[in-house]
Image: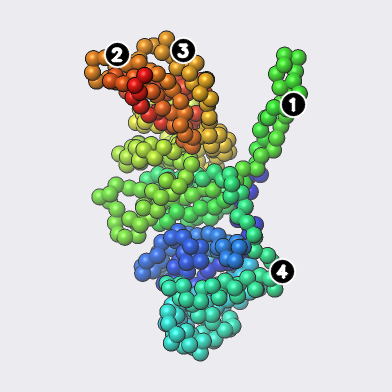
Amino acid sequence: MPRFVESLEGTFPTIALVGRVNVGKSTLFNKLTEETKALVSPIPGTTRTSNTGLVLWRGRYIRLIDTGGLTFEDDVLFEEDILKQSETAMKEADIIFFVVSAADGVMPQERELAKRMRRIIAKPVVLVANKADNRRLEQEARTSDLLSLGLGDPFPISAANGRNSGDLLDHTYAILDEIGLTAADEEPHDQDVISVSLIGKPNVGKSSLFNRIIGEDRVIVSEIAHTTREPYDTITEYTYEREIPTDETDERGEPLMTSQTIKQPIIFVDTAGIRRKANVSGHLEQAGIMKTLQSIDQSDIVLFVIDGSEPIAQQDMQLGGLIEKRGKSVIILINKWDLAPDNSTEKRNRTEKFVRAHFPHLSFAPILFVSGKTGEKIHQIFPAIIRAAEARKTEIVTSSLAHFLERITKEKLPSRGKGTRHPKLLGLRQIGTNPPVFEILVKYRTSLHRSYVNYVENKMREKWNFYATPIIIRLTKMRR
């Protein structure tokens, strides 16, 4: 992991959900975290990449990991990757929930998993008998052959209706107390977390970039389209130095600066690739795309990933428009630059102009040329994120905006839109941040041409810091 990035997920006691396919691990994950983060479906292998979330119970937090379902069959797609991630989750965890189906009894896959666990794990295991949806199934689970797994008495629950889920958490917290671990009483860095989503069409290398950025192989990487089915997020802490003014001044009266160490928490979200609606196949891909759109809405900053080894596709352009409409800060990442047949400086400049021509509505977005495979220029992403996050919070006092408007209207008179009356601008004020929103007051019964609004925006960008950030300008007609 890069020295300036540190994962914060290990600061909580951790529980890992493991088990074969279709025993309801993702349903249990959603129930305990009180979110619909994990995709749930009857299709075996719905969950591929391990998911993480926080559980709040009786005022204290624990971390929960949902792993992919195991089959121990060689011909199952990504089985080896899912098994590897499950073993990693079990090693990370302080307690393991071995999830089985109370209705099905013991399956051969569960005997195999129990055998592997006994070989690599020396920590508390809770045998969770899920799908005990009523009293009869609950009683049967307690007396079934589940005891033959050698993992202690089964704990019957129903993730679907919440039956006994609170008792399961009470039992878990009691185990944590026994082994000397205390659940956290607050969510760290809750007040100032930057949320960043990686967005792009399938196979542009989002997952490779995600793993490089956080410094760990957290998500499965494959050349198969739509390998990532649901958003996966992780929280990291980026450490950097910032210059701040002191109370002392120099001979010119300017404040002397000092260096301050900042530890900034950032949530990175790897999302499912979005492709053209006509090419979307099946419920799982549709559900994954909906979750990707939710991730964009919940993010502050979008890393828009484009494949630098291929021409820009129509789907890239549609995604660019989708991002721009949501008012998010955007950093364009030209990925796979190491695979480009010509990655000279001249070619880089031509490519940047080409990208600008295809995404004129994202003209405010900086462009970085990176490689998720080699790690090239990955270190540039973090300073860009910090700069963009600060720009989203830019606030400009009304007096400065008044002087600014007076100056630019003298340099260039406002041009009229529809109608015959020449427009008069009565004022400019800021009405929002994150992203910055401004309001131009226009004289009643006159109309301002859109090109002049663009002119105002460009002049604002020249004067103030709006790096990677859209500026929203609204027009209001006033009688005055």
Q: Earlier in the sequence, mark 4 or mark 1?
A: 4
Can residue 161 be seen? Answer: yes
Q: Which marked residue is nearer to the observer: mark 4 or mark 1?
A: 1
Give the labeled residue for mark 1: 247
Tag 1, which secondary structure? strand
Q: Earlier in the sequence, mark 1 or mark 2?
A: 1
Q: Which marked residue is nearer to the observer: mark 4 or mark 3?
A: 3
* Spot occupied by residue 267 in the image (x, y as percentages of width and height): 54, 48
Q: Residue at x 57, y 36 (%)?
A: 386
State how far apart marks 4 and 2 are (Cα): 75 Å
Q: Are marks 4 and 3 in contact (CB under 8 Å)?
A: no
Give the labeled residue for mark 2: 422
Left or right, 284 with respect to 64, comes to left
Q: Residue at x 30, y 39 (%)?
A: 314
What amino acid is found at the position of numbered circle 3 in the picture?
Arg
Q: Which mark is residue 407?
A: 3
Left or right, 235 with respect to 123, comes to left
